Image (cartoon, grey):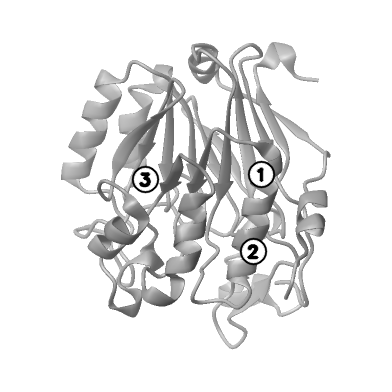
Amino acid sequence: MKTTRRTAIKAMAMTCTTLTLPLAAQSSVGKLKRLIKLGVIADPHIGFVKGAPERLSDFLEAMKREKPDALLQLGDFAFSNKQNKPHIDAFNAAHDVALHTIGNHDIRDKGLKREDCIKMWGIPAPYYTRDVHGMRLIVLDGNDPGSPTSKGGYPSYIGRKQQAWLRQQLETAKKPVLIASHQPLAGWAQVDNAKEIRKLLAEYRDRIMLCINGHSHCDQFLTINGLSYLHINSASYKWLGGKIRLVEYKDALFASLTFDPKKGEIKVKGVQSKWKNRSPADVGYFKKNNGQYAKYRHVTVPSISNRIIAPPMTRK
C-alpha cells in the first residue's frame, strides 16, 4: 500500500450530511470565544498493520493544509517501543498541541503498560484534561479493569475512581467540553458500563458539545438523551477476525472537526475512500455468527462521512 498524499487530501470530498445538534450542545458551542479546529485520527495500528506509518504521514501532511488548533489521536496508535518511536515523535512534532488517547492495543500487547504510553507519548496521565483556546478537552481511559460484566479479553470499562474524577471535571468546567475516549460511550463496541457513563454525562449535558471515540472501526453518529456521540473510523482497516483477519482501506482515513460558535454548529470533514482489495461483504462478514453484524452494515464503510451537526433552524 502507498496512498499518495495528494490522493489522501483529494479524498476529503465535499458531499455532506446535515444532522441535528441538541440544543444544550448548541448553547455550549456558542460559548466558545473563537472557531476551533481539531485534526483527528484513530486506530492506525502502527506496528501491527503494514502501511500504517504511511497513513500517519498522509494525515500529518493533510493537517499542514488544514491548520488545526490541535492534533488528537484516539488510540490504538502505535506500540510504544523503540521501533515506533520515530512515528510517535513525528506526531508530537507536527503540532504544538499533539494529544493522545490510550487504546486497548496500546497496552497489554507486546508486554506494554500504561506507563510506557505516558512516557513515550508525553501525556500527563492515562486520563487527563487539556484546554485548547477556550475548549476543555476531557480525555478518558476506557481500559480500566474490574468490569462486572466482562467476558474476558481486553478491558472495556471506566472504573469508579475515574468516574469520580470525570464528575469533578464536569462539575467545575467553566469552558465548553469535548469528551474523547478510545472505546465508545455509545453504539457499536461501547464500554461495558456505557449506560452508567451516559447517565453521568447527561447530568452535565449543558456543557458538553460532543463525545468522540475510535476503536469500533466504523463510521457512526448517535444522539442519546441530548448528547451526541461520533465514532471516528480507523485510519487503516476493518477488523473481521476469522480466517480473513482484516480488510484495508485504500486511502488513509482521518478527519478535521470544526466548532463554530457563530453558527452554533460542528463540522466534520472526513475522507471518503474505497476498499483496497476485498470488502467485508465479499468475504461473508455480514453472514457470520448468524448475521449479528448485519445491522452494522451501513456504518461498516471505508470512509469518515462529512457532516454538519447544526441547530434545527440552520439545517438545509
**In this view, which residue lies farthest toward the left?**
161
| Badge number at residue 234 | none
Question: In the rendered structure, which amino acid carries the disc numbered 2?
Answer: Arg
Provide the residue designation for mark 2: 55
Residue sitting nearer the eye, 78 or 301: 78
Q: Residue at x 54, y 32 (%)?
A: 69
Residue sitting nearer the eye, 208 or 49: 49
Question: In the rendered structure, which amino acid carries the disc numbered 3?
Answer: Ala
Query: Image check: 185 left or right of 199?
Result: right
Provide the residue designation for mark 3: 194
- CA gap between label 2 and label 1 equals 15 Å
Residue sitting nearer the eye, 69 or 226: 69
Provide the residue designation for mark 1: 64
Query: Image check: 250 left or right of 31?
Result: right
Q: Residue at x 39, y 18 (%)?
A: 175
**Nearer the observer, disc 3 or disc 1?**
1
Identify the secondary structure beneath mark 1. Answer: helix
Q: Residue at x 73, y 40 (%)?
A: 306
